Amino acid sequence: MTHVLGRRALNRATLDRQLLLRRSDLSVVDAVRRLAGLQAQTPHSWYVGLWSRLTDFAPEQAAGLLVDRTLIRIALMRSTIHLVTPDDARGLRPLIQPVLDRDLYQNHTHGKPIAGIDMTRLIADGVELLAPKPLTNKDLGALLAERWPDRAPASLVYAIRNQVPLVQVPPRGVWGRSGPIAHTTIDAWLGVGSPSTATLEWMIRRYLEAFGPASVKDVQVWSGLTKLREVVERMDLRVFQHSDGQVLYDVPEAVHPDPDTPAPPRFLYDFDNLLLSYADRSRVITDDHGRQGYRTQRPAPQILLVDGFTAGDWTVDRTADEVTLTIRPYQPLSSNADAVVAEGEALLAFLHADASSRKVLL
């Protein structure tokens, strides 16, 4: 008999995998590995993702790991920048290459300008030019234009970005610092690695360990890949049924917390994994959230979780030495208000430790 998972049971299992049910004592590296990477296309907002998940997290911990190359930021799932370990970068990138191929050749801006190009030669040129030092897109484009004068430089750069694993190098992404967006190849940054032996089964297991239980469509939304059903169904996985009828899969050894386990308030950053890695996001997304029109809103919202579900959004504004966290709840928070304010005060202390005045507006 297939076990049925209700919405709260699925919510608590998800929060537990994502280290949001309780803060973890894992190291930053182990946490990033546990999460199968952290979406990190913005320079700094992803630090909040680690703060919300780890005990006594200090931003300098992650910043130092970027500088010493223990962690890297690289385009992976859904063709977006993720913070990952080098091993995961080398394992995941070849598996999701079809996603990047599709993005390149079907891209409405760059697809036509690179049509019919000798891609092998272009890749070789890109690798050669990036080997001596990291380059900005502008600088790389100018150098490629000398070799490919009849092609749009921006499209040549975009093709290199899609076809060659490129690391976005520090100081970009380092807490408290800034710098231009510059890239080099993963082999130039880390040294030449051995060919990856990672399989789709390994990738799916990593996803379920970090995000499960989940459907085949969920795996496909997270990775950007298609036609994974056959792979999932041949794996040795537990099978559940969601209360809405969906078939869900999970690793056999997974722990499922009690649905009544308390879930403290959590502040999610604008591109938090939890909100972007499922086809069906109802395990955390409420109807109130859906009515906000966030899908067309830029910049992306930063979301508050209360009792494990989306309950509002938040912004931080600073003027001189005064910083204010403004929380906009979808509904009155009633008995949860004090806990939300306390978590908000801790967030402000993390984000702006040097501010002389910090306020939470609810």
Image (tube, grey):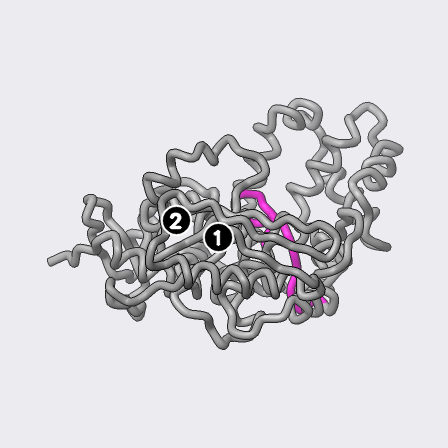
Q: Which of the two discs, 2 and 1, labels the residue nearer the N terminus?
A: 1
Q: Quadrant of residue 125?
A: top right
Of 235 and 76, nearer the camera is: 76
The amino acid marked with disc number 2 is Thr
User: How many other residues sit within 10 Å of disc 1, few (<14), some (14-19) or many (≥20)?
Assistant: many
When the figure is inspected, residue 135 is found, relative to residue 258, above or below; the finding is above
- Where does the image place residue 253, in percent across and percent down from the top left? 30, 70
Residue 6, position as x, y percentages in the image: 21, 54
Note whether 325 is above or below 78 in the view shown. Answer: below
Magenta segment includes 113: no
Residue 291 location, quadrant? top left
Span of residues in magenta: 69-82
- In which quadrant of the rendered image does the N terminus lie? bottom left
Mark carried by residue 310? 2
Q: Is residue 114 left or right of residue 239?
A: right
**C-alpha gap between disc 2 and disc 1:** 14 Å
Q: Residue at x 36, y 59 (%)?
A: 336
Residue 317, horizontal then vertical, whole percent: 64, 48
Q: On screen, 101 above or below 223?
A: above
Do we see residue 217 in this rendering? no
Magenta residue check for 73: yes
Residue in the foreground of this view, choosing between 227 and 251: 251
User: Which percent across, then down, holds residue 280?
Assistant: 34, 43
| Residue type indicated by callout 1 | Asn
Q: Which mark is residue 174?
A: none
Query: Image check: 14 left or right of 139?
Result: left
According to the picture, the residue beneath numbered tag 1 turns out to be 273
